[in-house]
Image: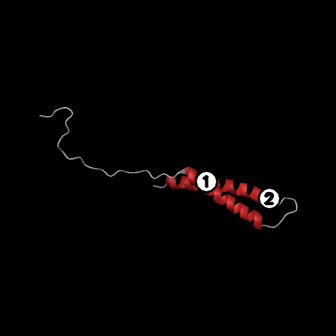
Amino acid sequence: MDYVGVMSQQPRKHEPRRFRRAPKFSAFLLTGALAGLVLGLVLGVTGPADARYDSFTAPGLLGLIFAGLGALTGGVVAVLLEKRP
């Protein structure tokens, strides 16, 4: 006789859980932007001096440009890691 609400005596099979290992896009974007910013600043400081620009203008512009490119690269890497099987 089986009562409603009473569990059957058959043991339950434990199936291994599958976790989706998706990358965190914000971490990839931020890491790429910071790496690009550092690279741009280093290139701006160590590059040849130009009389048209102030000593802070060239590293700042290169830092911003490389930060954008680094964020773009980090986003592409995150998408590629998400699409892998």
Q: Position of residue 69 (x, y in %)?
A: 67, 55
Q: Say whether residue 35 is left or right of residue 53.
A: left
Q: Say whether residue 13 is left or right of residue 75.
A: left
Please, which residue is most extreme toward the front here?
56
Q: Say whether residue 16 is left or right of residue 65.
A: left
Residue at the image point whose x is 80% and y is 57% from the top:
57
Label 2 amino acid?
Answer: Phe
Residue at the image point whose x is 60% and y is 57% from the top:
31
Q: Are marks 2 and 1 in contact (CB under 8 Å)?
A: no
54 or 77, nearer to the observer: 54
Name the residue that disc number 2 marks.
56
Q: Position of residue 75 (x, y in %)?
A: 59, 53
Using the rendered view, name the quadrant where residue 10 is placed.
Answer: top left
Q: Position of residue 68 (x, y in %)?
A: 68, 53
Q: Secondary structure at mark 1?
A: helix
Residue at the image point whose x is 35% and y is 50% from the top:
17
Other residues around mark 1 within 10 Å, as few (<14) / some (14–19) / many (≥20): some
Q: Secondary structure at mark 2?
A: loop
